Amino acid sequence: MKHIIKGQYIYEFSHQHKPIAVIQCGDTVEIEAIDCYSGTIQSEKDLVTDLPNRKPNPATGPIFVEGVNAGDLLEIHVQKIELNSFGVMPTRPNRGLLGEFITETQTRILPIQDNFITLQNITFPVNKMIGVIGVAPENEAVPNTTPGDHGGNMDTKDIKEGNILYLPVFHEGGLLALGDLHAAMGDGELDGSGVEVGGRVTLQVNKVEGVTLHMPLVKTADEVIIIASAIEFSDAVKKAMREAVRLIQKKTGLEFADAYRLVSAKGDLRISQLVNPEVTVRIALPKEWVEI
Ligand code: CA
Ligand code: ZN
């Protein structure tokens, strides 16, 4: 069955939210997402500082998935991402890694046409992705600015059309929500924003039983990518590595040191984002080394 879901947003992931829709495993959902500024920036005259109390990163949802329980995984096939006709990129003092060189708040509108984005006289291809997607976390609510083991603001380029995202479930129904689409974003999200855009996302949602994940994971055509977030960069890297070693050991039966060697020999450490309240990194492994 296909559901169309829109118009209701959360600003933090929490098991206390009432679901706005109930779906079955195997269903398809088309979710309308507004941009991370709630569509308040429509021209270059609109500045992020005009609405200081606006809550960032609205996520459409939550969606209750019938039959899904704590300890299961949600298996989310990202089938399609459709974008609105322009993206926005604000800059403001002290935002992003070179924020000290920005002296005034400014908005840039970037038209999107035929899968290309334009900034001034430069045109580059769309690389669309979902910035915020997650389930209700195990304990207290987590704001949509922050990534974690429940997903959230992971800002990870691999959460895109054609890939499968696995999220650990902490509460009955999962309580899935998403938002913060990007028409493009480089690894790091270095100035603090992607090409922020609204649009529609089509997902097919299933569950996996009997497999434990301690954090989100993406499966692509040839890789399994473990996504880890922590306040400190080195802690995020170690967290992803420990999960990589654990998953390789589980699939292969190898001892810790050999799985550790394989992570070093073939695992690629990549940076998702360095600008959110926790940083997000990922480790990509050959798909055949991990069983899901
Ligand atoms: Ca984001
Ligand atoms: Zn964003």
Image (cartoon, rainbow, N blue to C red):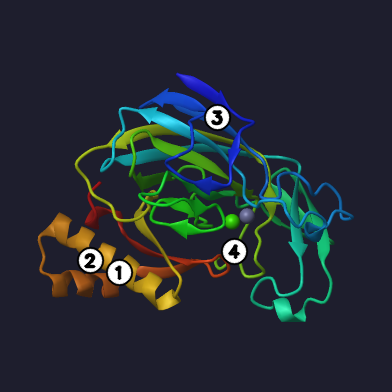
Which disc number belongs to residue 241?
Answer: 1
Q: Residue furthest right?
A: 45
Marks 4 and 3, how far apart at CA: 26 Å
Residue shown at the point (29%, 54%) measured from the top left: 287
Where disc 2 sits, the SS reads helix
Question: Which tag is nearer the camera, tag 4 or tag 2?
Answer: 2
Q: Amino acid at mark 4?
A: Gly
Residue highlighted by disc 4: 186
Cβ of mark 3 under 8 A from ligand 2: no
Residue 45 disc label: none
Q: Give the spatial CA distance, label 2 vs label 1.
A: 6 Å
- From the top left corner, tell me how far across and down residue 249 is, in percent: 16, 62
Residue sitting at x 31%, y 35%: 207
The quarter of the image that holds ligand 1 is bottom right
Residue found at x 74% / y 59%: 89
* Spatial separation of the CA atoms under disc 3 and disc 2: 36 Å
In the image, 111: left or right of 24?
A: right
CB under 8 Å between discs 1 and 4: no
Residue projecting furthest to the top? 1
Question: Which residue was labeled with disc 2?
Answer: 245
- Whether pointer 4 and pointer 2 mark residues with C-beta atoms closer than 8 Å, the reply is no
Whichever of callouts 4 and 2 sits on the residue coming sooner in the sequence is 4
Residue position for label 3 = 30
For marks 1 and 4, the one nearer the N-term is: 4
How packed mark 1 is, by other alpha carbons closer than 10 Å (few <14, some 14-19, many 20 or more), is: many
What amino acid type is highlighted by mark number 3?
A: Glu
Q: Nearer the viewer, mark 4 or mark 3?
A: 3
Q: Earlier in the sequence, mark 3 or mark 2?
A: 3
